[in-house]
Amino acid sequence: LSWPYDLVVKLLYGCGLRLFECLKLRIQNFNFDSDILTIRDGKGKKDRTVPIPQVLVPELHKQIEYVKAVYMEDLKSGYNGTFLLDQLEKKYKRCAKELIWQWFFPAYKLTQIPETGEKRRYHLHESHVQRELKKAVQLTMITKRIKCHTFRHSFASHLIQANYDIRTVQELLGHSDIRTTMLYTHTIKSQTKKEAVSPLDFKSKK
């Protein structure tokens, strides 16, 4: 995958994000001091936090520098700001032109609103990522069906395989019902059974 689609996929897997959650990220969602990524308005309009993968930090900073460059060019062109949620637009319209509110994965072109003539920027469209992933999968001749949501599934399955507490996985995924999280355990059941040992053997395993 080419940039920026490779970074999108790394975040889908590394943070367990849904595609729309990833593309709706803004600069302010990243707290590098605390190594925390905040996902706002996830499924069910809920917020949650996940750890920022340390291996991605250099790439994430590079992406922020790209966003800054796009932002500066936009301001020169008479930019009216990024798209905001309706309630924010009404209360804090000035936020639209602040750097922290800019999309982490901005669209390639500005959108001109016919009714007002305003120049705004949207985030990268989901269909672009889906198309690029489909092409990449075809090139690699992978025989399994892979979609953007596959990486979120892998995030959950690999955490459960690594013996993370199911409640922790639930919180990281943003599931309101733990039964939804439990569905991921079925895909790795045979492997965890094979690796399981008797409590009597715990000491000998150290």
Image: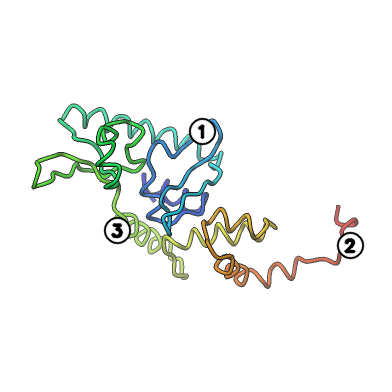
Which residue is drawn at the image coordinates 51% and 50% (left, top)?
15
Residue under the image location 61 percent in, 58 percent down: 158
Residue under numbered circle 3: 127
User: Quarter-wise, where is residue 79 in the image?
Assistant: top left
Left or right of 93 on screen, residue 38? right
Residue 201's label in the rendered image is 2
Mark 1 = which residue?
32
Please state which amino acid type lies under the numbered disc 1: Phe
Rounded to the nearest angstrom, the CA distance separating label 2 from label 1 is 41 Å
Name the image colouring. Answer: rainbow
In the picture provided, is 118 more to the left or to the right than 52? left
142 or 45: nearer the eye? 45
Please tell me whether mark 2 sits on a helix, a strand or a loop. helix
Total numbered labels: 3
**Mark 1 → mark 3, Cα distance in angstroms:** 29 Å
Quadrant of residue 69 in the image?
top left
Position above or below: 57 against 7: above
Please identify, in this view, whether the residue under mark 2 or under mark 1 is nearer the observer. 1
Type of amino acid at the residue the image marks with label 2: Asp
Circle 1 or circle 3, nearest the eye: 1
What's under tag 3, amino acid-wise? Ser
Q: Nearer the viewer, residue 183 or 85?
A: 85
Which of these two is toward me, 170 or 199? 170
Q: CA distance from mark 3 to mark 2?
A: 51 Å
Image height of 165 relative to 64, above or below: below
Reading the chain from its start, which is encountered first: label 2 or label 1? Answer: 1
Marks 2 and 1: CB-CB under 8 Å?
no
Q: Which mark is residue 198?
A: none
From this view, report whether residue 183 is shown above or below residue 128. below
